[in-house]
Image (spheres, helix red, strand yellow):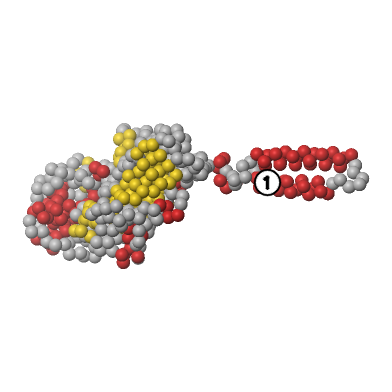
Amino acid sequence: MKPVARSIALSIIAALLAGCGGNETTDTEKQVQARLKAELEKIQAAQAATPSSQSPAVSAATSSWPEAKVPTAIPTIEEVAVLTDAPQVPPPITRTEPAKVIVNLEVTEVVKEIAEGVEYTFWTFGGSVPGKFIRVRQNDYIEFHLMNHPDSKMPHNIDLHAVTGPGGGAASSFTAPGHESVFSFTAMNAGLYVYHCATAPVGMHIANGMYGLILVEPEGGLPPVDKEYYVMQGDFYTSGKYGQAGLQAFSMEKALEENPDYVVFNGSVGALAGDNAITADLGDTVRLFIGNGGPNLVSSFHVIGEIFDAVYPESGSNVNHNVQTTLVPAGGSAIAEFKTETSGTFILVDHSIFRAFNKGALGMLKVGGEENKIVYSGKIDDRIYLPEGGTIQTIPQTTKLTPPATNKQERIDAGKIVYSQVCLACHQANGQGIPRAFPPLAEADYLNADTNRAISTVLHGLSGKVVVNGETYESIMPQLGFTNEQVANVLTYVYNSWNNNGTEVTPEMVEAVRAAGAPAVTPGVE
């Protein structure tokens, strides 16, 4: 019997007993009274056996993880924590009892690329964004050493959401450049927790990349899986627009308006794409430790082409099954698990979708092995639906003047930036395209055969069937609104990459094609 129902039953029985036992009690009434007393004794005994500190809302029967316990002693086992950079995760803990775990974490302020050709001064826990992944066990005693590198311009501290105590460690860890602070805490609650800097102005410190994750494994550990990865989203606010080259400063104005130029996984555009993609094999069970440093935006985390078999929302102990997209709040986290049933490239996105394709919140999971055509066939047939359809779309774009290149190498360098910002999502980092969807640019016969046709395609878009390297593709490439300089730069980059023919395209060549106008039928298209 549940505690609430037990209390109600006690009240009813007590009231009935109070009404019994008059001067002329019959034999039947005596029998009823005896039965009521017996029931009362049974319920009281059951109530006495239930711990008074346990409420129905946190009953062990409703939680898969052990409850927090107030520690009474420091463990005798001692070890130094293994820390890793994203997307890697330290190995699971095999200990069966708590330990004293020493965590050494250094704050550094570093200049790194946030996008191709765009630099930013990140404030970091451990030299990269997000900060180091920390993995401990429930009831471990953590001795935390926070060091602030002498070259830092600012004091820093750390607020770990896994800490039970005022400030989450922030008040005890305020550290000037060149200094080290030490404090300790017991990891009482299992879960996946965000940590971040909490030095004023707090928002600015977080916006510059000062966040990471600490996993407190439950006493029995997490179920074994084949692959574990660390993915953390953040929003960044720069003085220049998305893709503007050079070293960009932090913009407090944009941060206050919650209008980021970049929304990225693991600190930069492309940190989980192309050669940096995370990997798995067919049949693997994958576990993603997902965090959101913010400072402002909530993440709608989704893996295109996968359904999460299990999600621990907000990294609590309850589990949801068969989840398509999970919300991860700023300063929060989630654990998602799924099995790979077919091979291919699966795209990780924030499904607030402009963030993915226009601000950088896009990653890749590459699953090796044979395709399972029963799970997913791919395109089986392609036929005309409406003969008059397929109008080329136009993407409006505010013109942004690009400094003119003065030589071929400058044109290649500038074109690489344009490609990474606009073309990479479809044609991929190495120009290989996506089979049956977007044609390759690497060693592409269609591209190398006719430079003017390539210029026209970038200027005016493309629709209908096109044959590239013997394969037929039918998808719509929109008009991109590029300037002559941008078209010349991106095509020169493509022509001088991936074993293409080395052509240099100039703005004058682009202007000549533009002046001729869009062809009635795109050359080379069936």
Q: Secondary structure at mark 1?
A: helix
Q: Residue at x 25, y 55 (%)?
A: 152
* Above/below status of 246 relative to 425: below
Is residue 303 among what the camera can see? no
- Where's residue 256, x and y in %? 35, 65
Residue found at x 34% / y 34%: 282
Residue matched to label 1: 5
- The front one of 84 and 377 is 84
162 relative position to 84: left or right: right
Tell me which amino acid carries mark 1. Ala
Q: Which sits in the foreground, 57 or 225?
A: 57
Q: Residues within 10 Å of mark 1 (few under 14, many from 20)?
A: few
**Residue drawn at (17%, 64%) of the image:** 401
- Relative vertical location of residue 479 with respect to residue 231 in this rendering, above or below: below
Locate residue 481, reporting x and y percent.
Answer: 22, 61
- Percent position (x, y) of residue 209? 31, 54
- Percent of width and height locating residue 17: 81, 46
Image position of 96 with respect to 271: above or below: above
